[in-house]
Image: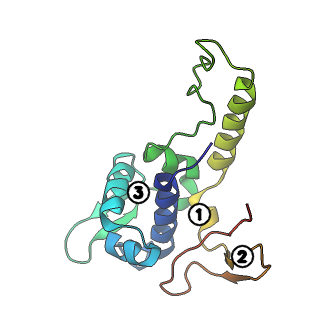
Amino acid sequence: MRLTTKGRFAVTAMIDLASRQDSGPVTLNGISERQRISLSYLEQLFGRLRRCNLVKSVRGPGGGYRLARKMDEITVTDIVLAVDEPLDATRCGGRANCNNAAQCMTHDLWSNLNRRMFDYLDSVTLGSLVGRPIYIGSCVSGERQAISPQMGQGQIQMPVHAV
């Protein structure tokens, strides 16, 4: 199972938007610069987020994007599914035909992981991610520093985990 760049970038961009929207509509160009995500990629993602009623666009001078719902009503699952990111650890896409049209020996294991992953991501709201300290640095070296997502214009970075 793997959450691809599409899902990670969508969640990161939504955190950036949610943490800055009190100052007015947030531009994709601003998100692009702060998060180092291609503007054309953000345009594709935000088109999907808009069609799923997670964001709304504000046209004209001073325009940009705002959340379409309260941040406590938007879950990480909502964001990931809106950008067509599959949340599936099975080889068969949940169809139970992994092994020559039959269910493989590990199908139930991966299906249960899918359910738990979905339940967890569905329990995490955008509001719970905004304003929460974000750690930068390395778990390997032990050097980590907490920053606030609103501290200036820097990139929001998630914790680095040793592999």
Residue 141 lies in what quarter of the image?
A: bottom right
Return the disc, 1 or 3, that comes first in the chain's sequence: 3
Residue 153 x %, y %: 47, 84
Q: Give the spatial CA distance, label 2 vs label 3.
A: 35 Å
Query: From what the image shows, is residue 98 above or below residue 102?
Result: below
> Is residue 77 visible to the viewer in this orientation of the structure?
yes
Q: Identify residue for label 2.
A: 138
- Marks 1/3 in contact by CB < 8 Å: the verdict is no
Q: CA distance from mark 1 to mark 3?
A: 13 Å
Give the number of the disc on residue 68.
Answer: 3
Precedes in sequence: disc 1 or disc 2: 1
SS under mark 2? loop
| Image quadrant containing the N terminus | top right
Residue 123, horizontal then vertical, whole percent? 67, 49
Q: Secondary structure at mark 1?
A: helix
Q: Which residue is mark 1?
A: 127
Identity of the residue drawn at 67% across and 16% down = 103
Decide if residue 10 is on the left or right side of residue 156. Answer: left
The amino acid at mark 2 is Ser
Occupied quadrant, residue 28: bottom left
Relative to 150, 143 lies left or right: right
Camera-near label (2 vs 3) is 2
Query: Are the residues tagged 2 and 3 within 8 Å (C-beta)?
Result: no
